Each structure stands twice: as structure tokens, then as C-alpha cells.
Amino acid sequence: MSSLRITAGPYVFTARLEEKAAPRTCAAIRALLPMRTKLIHARWSGEAMWVPMGDQRVDVAQEHHTSHPAPGHLLLYPGGISETEVLVPYGATLFASKVGQLAGNHFATITDGLQDLADLGRLTLWQGAQDLAIAIEEA
């Protein structure tokens, strides 16, 4: 089983890939890794952070999608009516953009470090963009 190692600001998290529920999305994410970018606070989604990916398209249809992710449920929005992004919710979240409500593919769940996720969210809100690195960890 594969997992993700996520380093965001001063925090480190481990996330389980949801390969049974979202196999195509997990494959698309694997193709993007390792990823080094910035994590910023969400503007419309509530208690969440996101990785804006602009016009980069990820060729995957909806699978295991939601607009109401739980804290630590990572979503991929592959582009369409809004820009491509990865959403990282840390509290009450309704996934949305300036064009309205969105649904993203739940591709990973944070399993280690979840207790630090809200602190990272507040840090990102008050201190700004945080460095983010995501890589595969094979078990």
C-alpha cells in the first residue's frame, strides 16, 4: 500500500491514498509527484487550504467526489468551470470557487499528523503561503 508524505510549513503528515475508491485520480496524482509548491488559504471554501494549479488539466472524471470533505480528506479538482487544484480541508468546508459550489475527487486521507492540521490552517491564514512538498512513500 502506498501513502503520501506531506511536508507543509513546519508540519509533516502521512496520508493514505484512496486507491480502491478513486483509482484513476490516484494514478493522476502519482503522475504529478513529487510536487513542490505553495499551500495557500482557501478563499471561498471555509476552513481549507489549496494548491492552485492554474490551467494545468488533469484528465480524470469525477470519482469518489464530494463538496463536503472532512478535515484531512484531500480533494483533486481536475479543472473545468474553475482552475485545477488540490484542496486540503482542516475544518468546516464547503468546496467552492468564485463560480459557485464544486465537487472534488477524494484521493487521500491524512492518517498521521491530523492533530496538527488546524494549526497549519491557522498558520496559513495568518502568516500566508506555506512551502509544500508531497511525495510517495511505498510501504
Image (spheres, grey):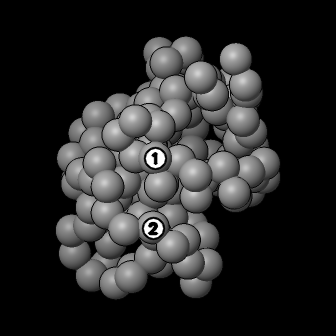
Mark 2 sits on what residue? 60
Look at label 2 and name its amino acid. Val
Quadrant that contains the C terminus: top right
Q: Where 19 falls versus 38 (above or below)?
A: above
Residue 80 visible at all: yes
Quadrant that contains the N terminus: top right
Q: Residue at x 73, y 27 (%)?
A: 137
Mark 2 secondary-structure assignment: loop
Along the line of sight, the residue nearer the viewer: 2 or 134: 2
Q: Is residue 56 left or right of residue 36?
A: left
Q: Is disc 2 in contact with disc 1, using a CB cutoff of under 8 Å? A: no
Q: x, y percentage for residue 101?
A: 21, 68
Q: Residue at x 58, y 52 (%)?
A: 27
Mark 1 sits on what residue? 23
Q: Is residue 33 left or right of residue 121?
A: right
Look at label 1 and name its amino acid. Pro
Q: Is residue 39 left or right of residue 45?
A: right
Marker disc for residue 114: none
Along the line of sight, the residue nearer the viewer: 37 or 110: 110
Mark 1 secondary-structure assignment: helix
Residue 128 visible at all: no
- In the picture, residue 79 is in which quadrant? bottom left
Q: x, y percentage for residue 52?
A: 57, 67
Q: Residues within 10 Å of mark 1 (few under 14, many from 20)?
A: some
Q: x, y percentage for residue 136?
A: 72, 35
Q: Residues within 10 Å of mark 2 (few under 14, many from 20)?
A: some
Q: Residue at x 35, y 32 (%)?
A: 71
Q: Where 57 falls versus 90 (above or below)?
A: below
Mark found first going from the N terminus, 2 or 1 = 1
Q: Residue at x 74, y 51 (%)?
A: 33
